[in-house]
Image (cartoon, helix red, strand yellow):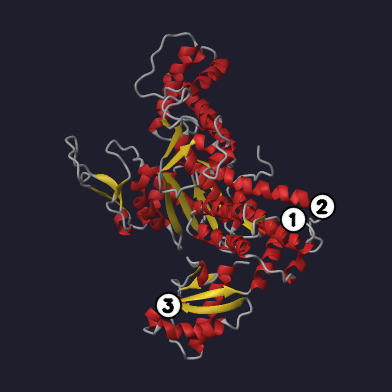
Amino acid sequence: MDIVNILREKILNIVYELVEEKKLKQPINNNNIVVERPKKLHQGDYSTNAAMVLGKKLSLNPKDLGDLIKLKLRDEEIIDHVSFDGPGFLNIKINPKFWHRLIAEIMSSDNCYGEVSLGNGRKVILEFVSANPTGPLHLGHVRGAVFGDVLSRLLKFVGFKVTREYYVNDGGAQIGILVRTVYYRYLEKLGEAIELPEESYPGDYLIPIAEKLIANYGKKLKNLVEVERDKIIRSFSIEHMMEVIRADLRSLNIQMDNFFSEQAMIDSNGIEMSLNTLKGKGLIYKGIIDPPKGKTYTDWKVREQLLFKSTNFGDDIDRPIKKSDGSWTYFAPDLAYHADKIKRGFDVVIDILGADHSGYVSRLKAVIKAFSEKPVEFEVKLVQLVKLIKNNKVLKMSKRAGDYILIQDLLEEVSSDVIRFVMLTRSNDVPLDFDIDLMLSKSKDNPVFYVNYAHARIASVLKRAKELKLWPLDEIGDLHKKTLPFMESELMLIKKISEWPNVVRQAARYHEPHRIAFYLNEVASSFHSLYQSSRDTIPYRFIVEGSKELSINRLALAYSTQIVIKNGLSLLGIVPLDEMY
């Protein structure tokens, strides 16, 4: 039961009725009409800007329009009172009986409470992580990994068919560096004195690959021609690193649906086929591009290149496909990969990239438009950096990786559930500080502890209620018949948990899963406030001795709150705690 959406639909229906009754001209657009909680309690339970928005569009006095809407709203069963306020806001007071029906519905819906229909079975491909297979996942990858996983859970929850994909960048120059480094480690493990070249991966994590090569080939690789030797090392190295990466993802409770190999795409002539498609549309030509603006390049050479007419689709410049030596540019595989996404029939394409890839956005949008024969929703979500802090100091180095803090290093400090929640305590486009000491503390400043503590408190209350045979209820459906009024402090919590379906809707619509973490913290705060409240010096109790009806009323509220917290944590990929240690 999404009260915000219910009220908005009722208001829109009233507007359409007024149009049919010739009391209003046809509205231009209703998208700006919102229903929300007012900032001040005395203004009602909910507020809408309908009169102000439509009055401005239709050149009508908002007060006159508000009176028309108010008259019809008063006839609605769930509405107790409507008043006009300020420049054009209608303040709505909900019928108290509604809140009992809401509690009953939350309890009946349980895991399904919050489900909204947005996707309607549309196919989404969500590409995230896509780290080079040259090392384990590190702190720079973890935020995008969690963001992508939670967004995929959220989109599935609202009815999309989601494919989570990892693009394995195994066809670029970095793989050559990986192969060379592994060979040097191989020689080192054979007892030779070696010094890693300047262009190499210095971390210890490549040593197990060298040991595996020795176990399988002994010293034989030294006697093979370079091409054959490198082919063996390449296969071993990529297979090993991808298994390490899969294990890293599993440790964060992340499971990919597909791993897409860049090299396999190249070997199957995927780039050539994509270019042929663009040539058929007249979008590939030979031309000359200017040097990048704002810098002086002494070695810049004017040369003819194979170019994609990306400016036809809003890009700043046409993008080169081939280098002067005839090899592919970095953009060529990206072009072919996104063409493949379109070919597979996805309706929504979402890329989650690091903030340093902001320059890719316009060219990728151009590719999607060039290959799409039907409307395709495309979005790039850029994920900002994370700073890891311990003892008030920023950590930057890892013993195992050399230059990075590995995911496994972080997991030695805090659990995967903590990592997942913290990575969503800020919007993806804002830098994030991950304070290990704070996340290990048991305080309200630690959002993971604070939310789980609310769930555990409720679990403790319900456990005691079961011992007293007050719980579970025999018949949930009878709850809506209750007439016992809720106190104002209880209504604050009820109104907060009533927002859950709308939070899900907005988080999914705008691809902003951090809204869920924010909301759960608000629910926990509202619950803890009620739990610790007193009335006339009598502490608030969910189980009231001598009053079964009041106890059941409060226990139902507590359980409904627990359902909301559980469902929210589930979307974050976190198992809620029944006990805190």
What is the distance, in whole Å, between disc 1 and disc 2 at their CAs? Answer: 9 Å
Give yes or no for contact between labels 1 and 2 (Cβ–Cβ under 8 Å): yes
Is 65 above or below relative to 407? Answer: below
Residue 543: image tag: 1
User: Where's residue 511, x and y in %?
Assistant: 49, 55
Quadrant for the C terminus, please: top right
Q: Amino acid at mark 1?
A: Ile
Provide the residue designation for mark 2. Answer: 468
Q: Nearer the viewer, mark 3 or mark 2?
A: 2
Q: Which amino acid type is marked by label 3? A: Gly
- In this rendering, would 474 be left or right of 250? right
**What's the amino acid at mark 2?**
Leu
Mark 3: few/some/many CA within 10 Å (<14, 14-19, 20+): many
Toward the viewer: 223 or 246? Answer: 246
Distance from disc 3 to disc 1, alpha carbons, whole Å, reads 44 Å
Res 257 visible: no
Residue name at image x 68 percent, y 69 percent: 485
Q: Are marks 3 and 2 in contact (CB under 8 Å)?
A: no
Outermost residue, bottom side = 22
Residue where numbered disc 3 is placed? 88
Residue 95 in the image: above or below residue 137: below
Percent position (x, y) of residue 417?
58, 41
Between the C-alphas of marks 3 and 2, the distance is 51 Å
Q: Quadrant of residue 96?
A: bottom right
